[in-house]
Structures are given as C-alpha cells and as structure tokens.
Amino acid sequence: MTALCNDEEISCIPSGNAKRSKILVGDYVDLIPNDYGEKQVVSKVLPRRNVLIRPPIANLDQLFIIFSKVPKTDYLLVDKLLVYCYINNIVPFIVINKVDLYTEDEILDIKKQYSDAVSDIICVSGTNGIGIDELRKKLNGMLSAFAGQSAVGKSTILNAISPKLKLKTNGLSRKINRGKHTTRHSEIYVVDDIKIADTPGFSMLDLNIDIEPEDLGKYYKEFDKIGKCKYTNCDHTNIDDKDCMIAKLVKENKINDLRYKRYVQLYNLLKEKWRKKYD
C-alpha cells in the first residue's frame, strides 16, 4: 500500500498493531522507519471522522451526487444517499451534469426537490466546461467522492476539472492506494489540492442503515428548516394528520411532495426491515 506524505507517495506496510484489514482508504496514519526494508511501517491509525462499510472508506468530507438526463436519475437512490451522508457527517452536493441537455423547467424541478436538502446544487457540463470552476472550488482541500449511475459522466467531469487527469474508465494519472478491503480495492485520486476517492460502491448503495424508522425524519434537512410537529414522536407518514406539521407543509407546497412521497416509501422500507429483524 502507499500513503501520501507532504505531497510524496510513500510505500508502506502495516505493523502488527495496524493490520492491513483494519486500514481503510482515507485513513490518517503514523509512519515509522522500517529496520528490515525500504518501506515505511504504519504504526498507528489515527482517530476517524467517519467510517463507511460500503464502500470501505474513512474520513470522507463530501459526497457529490451526479445527475444526468441520460441515464435517467434514480431519485430514490439519491434520497438514500442523502440519508447516508447525514448519518455519517458527510456534506452532500448535487451536480447536474450535461446541463445543456436539460430544459429550464427540468432543472427547476430538481432544485425544488433538493435545494433545502443539500449544501448546494451545481450545474455543469464536463464536455463544454460549464460550471467546472465552481465545482473545482468545492473540491479543494477536501476528501470527496462522486456517486452516480454508470454513464452519468463522472470521468468526463474529472477530466474537465484538471488537465492533469486522463481518465478513461478506471485509470488516472496519479493514484494513492492507501488500503485494501477484503471485497474491493479502493484508491484516492490526487491532483493538486483535490482528493477524490474511487468508491464505486456508492452507485450500488442499498439502505443498509441501522436506524429506527421513526428517526428517518431527522435526516431530512428540509423538515428541520421549516417547522416541527406538535408531537415529538410523529413519523410524518400520514398526509391527512392535522397535527403533523410536515404533512401540513407538504399540502401548502412548502415541502416538495415528491420528496415527501419517497420519504414515506423509505420509512416503510425501514419499518419492514425492522419488523423482519425482530420477528
């Protein structure tokens, strides 16, 4: 494995106290000289900001969820990813790629659904360079990952971010291999002050989240921004509940009805999961 230290790639091996299986992509580690070879020794894995299992990565700062008109966006997957981000203290962004293919009404619809749910929505074209400077600023100084279905244009966006990148499918000009998991090999792409984790698992994410169904609403930021229910234990799933502030705001078009309907769908999926867990 390799680590990045002062902009230099260093070959290293884990010590007995930091076995390879316990080191994840994104880990910060202590290195010490190796008396028996040229490679440095990873003596310690430093405390982590977060730890994700699928994909296996630590200390992720940001997740950029890529939209594209073709293939059609899986909005339920997007909502799952947002829940996943907020549970794990990751800042989510939405990137509308191939923006020149969208109508103004289509872009407005996406913004209506997600403006109160994410930190920012960025419109880009990896092919034409639209919005790339704005996206590059968001990436600087952070460990980020891109999520999206196949063919949404992740590689094209990365190539547009920096002329140093020559990404075709999974190749990149510079790779920092900082860990190996038993089920997949993960890497970090580094260009100047930009670090992007190669995490294909985000495109296949299932809602394997160990939270109670009643806690799901805590991870819908638009709920907190606008109002709270009369009852603290309200699950917000009954649109006709007069005491539910969320249902009231949906009817008043202050919370997007499409996001709300998918919220109810996710709530029911979680409820079924917990029912099977304790049956």
Image (tube, helix red, strand yellow):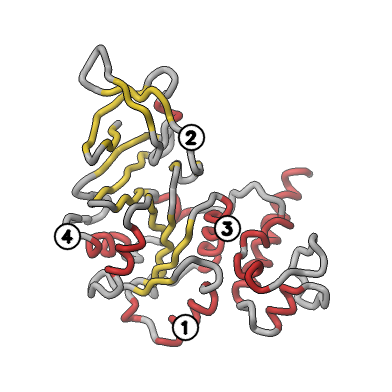
Name the N-terminal-most of marks 2 and 1: 2
Percent position (x, y) of residue 255? 63, 77
At a point 32% along the width and 61% down the height, the residue shown is 154
The image shows residue 254, relative to residue 259, as above or below, that is below
Residue type, label 1: Leu
Assign a secondary structure to mark 2.
Answer: loop
Instruction: Tell me if label 3 and label 2 are in contact, CB under 8 Å.
Output: no
Q: Earlier in the sequence, mark 2 or mark 4?
A: 2
Earlier residue among tags 3 and 2: 2
Taking depth in this image into account, of 204 and 221 the one nearest to the observer is: 221
Residue 194, position as x, y percentages in the image: 29, 53
Crowdedness near tag 1: few (<14), some (14–19) or many (≥20) residues, C-alpha within 10 Å: few
Taking the spot 71% from the left edge, 51% from the top edge, the residue there is 212
Label disc, if present, on residue 83 of the rendered structure: 3
Characterize the local packing of mark 3: few (<14), some (14-19) or many (20 or more) Cα atoms within 10 angstroms.
Answer: many
Identify the residue position indicated by label 2 in the image. 47
Q: Amino acid at mark 3?
A: Val
Classify 141 as above or below 111. Answer: above
Q: Please give the residue where the numbered disc 1 appears in the rendered image.
A: 108
- Give the Cα separation between the discs numbered 2 and 4: 34 Å
Asked whether the residues under the numbered discs 2 and 1 touch, taking CB atoms below 8 Å apart as contact, a structural biologist would say no
Q: Which residue is denoted by mark 4 in the rendering?
A: 163
User: Which of the two labelled residues, at mark 4 and mark 1, occupies the earlier sequence position?
Assistant: 1
In the orientation shown, which residue stands out farthest toward the top? 36
* Number of residue marks: 4
Q: Are marks 4 and 1 in contact (CB under 8 Å)?
A: no
